[in-house]
């Protein structure tokens, strides 16, 4: 990673879509799975998902299209619980198992710079990453999530104490995710340094950082807004069960 400092791009570098056209971040998972992450995608027609050990997310080309929901059912199987993005409602026969409000924020004024103390994390670090994720609960992280992009960590006497990395990658954008700090080391600005460092790498390849947070996590939202992110829209995280017999009910 370069040691140069990266400031937020001007607003003219990220043109806004026409008011009549949806923004690519409105369906970021679909844009990623049919774009830069297409090599990871498992797809049936108008539905796609990540491998179940990479990310829990599935996506629909158009959540208003019943055919896309049919394709999703074929992709994941009957009676299966799966996480669906960008879907405000589900068709008849589907069940909502869990739903939560979220927010999507985009980089508008972030000061991005490398963190000299940060180290690149890879497959060998996954057990330690999973331990930190379990302790801090920043969101889903699976054994192969590190394949989605760059993950950076900060260590203290060899122990991983802070983490941030890249998740969804729609064309022109990259999501910053898994931002967390061990409770014993909070208050030192570690998360902010890692967010800035991950953002510097994102900017290096010409993408714009964005991120998601639970709407209830007001502390994190205030932090992100204070360092240069702006609320773009409110989102809904939904776990749904596909129609048909539940797997445990099968003979």
Image (tube, grey):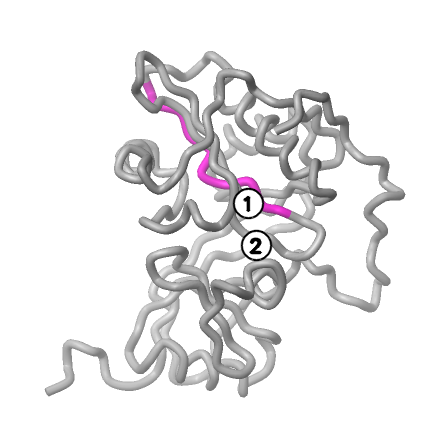
Q: Residue at x 67, y 26 (%)?
A: 112
Relative to 141, say whether 83 is above or below: below
Classify 248 as above or below 1: below
Residue 13 located within the stretch drawn in magenta: no
**What residue is at 45 percent from the left and 72 percent from the top?**
42
20 lies left or right of 104: right
Q: Is residue 237 above or below residue 191?
A: below
Name the residue at the right extreme: 12
Quadrant where the image shows the C terminus: bottom left
Assess whether mark 2 and mark 1 are in contact (beta carbons under 8 angstroms): yes
Q: Nearer the viewer, mark 1 or mark 2?
A: 1
Q: How many marks?
A: 2
Viewer-proximal residue among 4 and 59: 4
Closer to us: 239 or 111 = 111
Secondary element at tag 1: strand
Q: Which residue is more in the foreground, 149 or 175?
A: 149
Query: Magenta region: which residues?
Result: 174-183
Instruction: Specify whether residue 182 is painted magenta.
Output: yes
Query: Considering only order in the chain, which callout, 2 or 1, is on the residue closer to the N terminus?
Result: 1
| SS under mark 2 | strand
- Tell me if residue 30 comes above or below residue 169 in the rendering: below
Residue 128, located in which quarter of the rendered image? Answer: top left
Q: Where residue 204 appears, x then y in whole percent?
A: 70, 36
Q: Quadrant of residue 20?
A: bottom right
Few, some or many C-alpha atoms within 10 Å of disc 1 (few <14, some 14-19, many ≥20)? some
Picture coordinates of residue 88, whole percent (x, y): 54, 67
Q: Report which residue position mark 1 lands on.
A: 212
The residue indicated by pointer 2 is 235
């Amino acid at each position: 990673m370069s040691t140069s400092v990266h400031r937020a791009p001007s607003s003219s570098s990220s043109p806004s879509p026409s008011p009549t056209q949806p923004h690519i971040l409105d369906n970021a998972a679909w844009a990623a799975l049919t774009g830069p992450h297409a090599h990871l995608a498992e797809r049936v027609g108008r539905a796609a998902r990540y491998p179940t050990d990479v990310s829990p997310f599935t996506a629909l080309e158009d959540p208003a299209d019943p055919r896309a929901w049919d394709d999703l059912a074929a992709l994941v199987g009957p009676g299966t619980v799966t996480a669906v993005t960008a879907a405000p409602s589900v068709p008849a026969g589907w069940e909502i198992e869990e739903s939560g409000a979220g927010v999507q924020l985009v980089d508008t004024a972030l000061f991005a710079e490398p963190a000299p103390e940060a180290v690149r994390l890879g497959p060998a670090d996954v057990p330690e990453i999973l331990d930190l994720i379990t302790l801090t609960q920043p969101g889903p992280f699976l054994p192969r999530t590190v394949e989605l992009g760059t993950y950076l960590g900060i260590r203290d006497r060899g122990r991983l104490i802070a983490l941030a990395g890249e998740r969804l990658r729609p064309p022109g954008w990259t999501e910053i995710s898994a931002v967390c700090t061990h409770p014993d080391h909070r208050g030192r600005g570690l998360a902010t340094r890692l967010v800035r460092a991950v953002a510097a790498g994102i900017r290096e390849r010409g993408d714009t950082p964005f991120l998601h947070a639970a709407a209830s996590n007001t502390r994190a939202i205030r932090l992100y807004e204070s360092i240069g992110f702006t609320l773009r829209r409110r989102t809904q995280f939904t776990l749904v069960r596909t129609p048909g017999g539940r797997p445990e009910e099968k003979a």
